[in-house]
Image: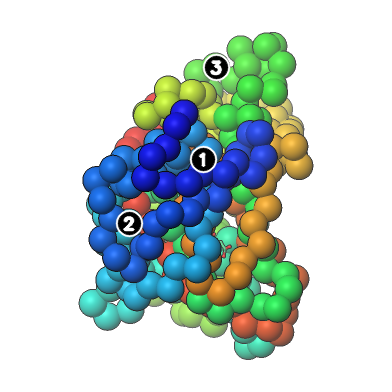
């Protein structure tokens, strides 16, 4: 598909494209926003370089794509609950997104997309991996596809956020975290393509299957879904942006840069109930 107001350079045949020709610190034209929607639908994750922007510009960019989501465990700093700080340094005991996942898939209506901006990155390392869940679904055998038809799986935030809070020394105060059941194979509401929708971090079990069988199937799917041939790997520079579609992408942040600092923030866009 052609683009007139932005430049789009695919990074792999299946997933990922670099986008140039926009300045996120300034308002975008309707045409640019339309073409960014189109590029995201086509490539699932977009990467932009040299985009220094403040919190308001970051939120404005997010709002071109929908209402902003507030994280169930970590609402943002005063006045900006929709901002999720992403920060690691020599004092960190964990990082955000260290295991393969789709953002907050435990929500009844999980986020459609996420926009991560990093202003500070380590000299080397700290890459993020993204895996196309369309490509994973399409590569399954016809027999496996029909086995998965109609199955749902439970996604829970409880063990994820409690683990993270424990590592950060945050005391639990009786807070409960989201839990939801979603189709194992979902249909993307925009592209109508089918994508696998289970992940190793939030998905606890496949509903209604005998325990051993469900565990084996889930383990197979989580491994399969993140194979190298479905991936693109992003090497950050200061002021880079990654914009991914959680409905058809899983991602994982690598923590190979300790004790260096990697820092920025994420804005997350609300989504619909998966079907
Ligand atoms: C996240 O899961 O949003 C964090 C990704 C990253 O830091 O690369």
Give the class, few, some or many, for how many residues have Cα within 10 Å of label 3's Cα (few <14, many ≥20): few
Mark 3 lies within 8 Å of ligand 1 (Cβ measured): no
Spatial separation of the CA atoms under disc 2 and disc 3? 33 Å
Q: Secondary structure at mark 2?
A: helix
Mark sitting earlier along the chain (3/1): 1
Residue 5 coordinates in the image, percent (x, y): 37, 45
Q: Is residue 243 in view from this perspective?
A: yes
User: Residue beneath label 2, please?
Assistant: 62
Q: Residues within 10 Å of mark 2 (few under 14, many from 20)?
A: many
Q: Does the CB distance between marks 2 and 1 fall below 8 Å?
A: no
Q: Considering the image in quadrants, where does the C terminus appear?
A: top left
Q: Report the residue at 69% width, 11% height from top.
A: 143
Say which mark, if any, is on residue 44: 1
Percent of width and height locating residue 48:
50, 58
- Secondary structure under badge 3? loop
Q: Position of residue 20 (x, y in %)?
A: 48, 54
Q: Tell me what residue is drawn at x 63 percent, y 88 percent.
A: 91
**The residue tagged with tag 1: helix, strand or loop?**
loop
Q: Is residue 69 above or below residue 105?
A: below
What's the residue at 27%, 71% (across, down)?
56
* In the displayed structure image, the side of residue 69 where residue 169 appears, left or right: right
- Which of pointers 2 and 3 indicates the residue nearer the eye? 2
Classify residue 4 by image quadrant: top left
- Mark 2 to mark 1 CA distance (whole Å): 16 Å
**Does the CB distance between marks 2 and 3 fall below 8 Å?**
no
| Position of 200 relative to 83 (above/below) | above
Q: Is residue 87 above or below residue 33?
A: below
Q: Quick check: which quadrant has ligand 1?
A: bottom right
Question: Separation of disc 3 and disc 1 at Cα?
Answer: 23 Å
Q: Which mark's residue is nearer the viewer, 3 or 1?
A: 1
Of the image marks 2 and 1, the number of the one nearer the N terminus: 1
Camera sees residue 165:
no
């Amino acid at each position: 598909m052609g683009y007139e107001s932005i430049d789009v350079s695919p990074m792999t045949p299946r997933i990922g494209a670099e986008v140039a020709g926009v300045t996120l610190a300034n308002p975008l034209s309707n045409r640019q926003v339309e073409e960014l929607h189109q590029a995201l639908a086509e490539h699932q994750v977009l990467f932009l370089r040299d985009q220094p922007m403040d919190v308001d510009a970051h939120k404005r960019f997010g709002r071109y794509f929908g209402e902003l989501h507030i994280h169930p465990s970590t609402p943002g700093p005063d006045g900006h609950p929709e901002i999720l700080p992403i920060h690691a340094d020599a004092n960190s005991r964990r990082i955000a997104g260290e295991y393969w996942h789709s953002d907050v898939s435990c929500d009844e209506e999980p986020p459609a997309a996420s926009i991560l901006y990093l202003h500070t990155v380590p000299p080397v390392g700290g890459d993020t991996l993204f895996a196309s869940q369309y490509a994973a679904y399409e590569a399954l055998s016809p027999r496996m596809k029909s086995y998965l038809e109609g199955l749902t799986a439970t996604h829970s935030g409880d063990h994820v956020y409690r683990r993270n809070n424990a590592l950060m020394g945050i005391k639990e105060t009786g807070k409960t975290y989201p839990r939801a059941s979603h189709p194992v194979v979902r249909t993307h509401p925009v592209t109508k393509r089918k994508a696998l929708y289970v992940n190793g971090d939030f998905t606890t079990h496949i509903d209604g299957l005998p325990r051993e069988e469900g565990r084996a199937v889930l383990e197979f799917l989580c491994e399969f879904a993140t194979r190298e041939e479905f991936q693109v790997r992003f090497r950050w520079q200061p002021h880079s942006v990654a914009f991914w579609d959680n409905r058809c992408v899983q991602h994982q942040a690598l923590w190979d840069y300790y004790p260096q600092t990697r820092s920025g923030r994420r804005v997350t866009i609300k989504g619909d109930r998966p079907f």
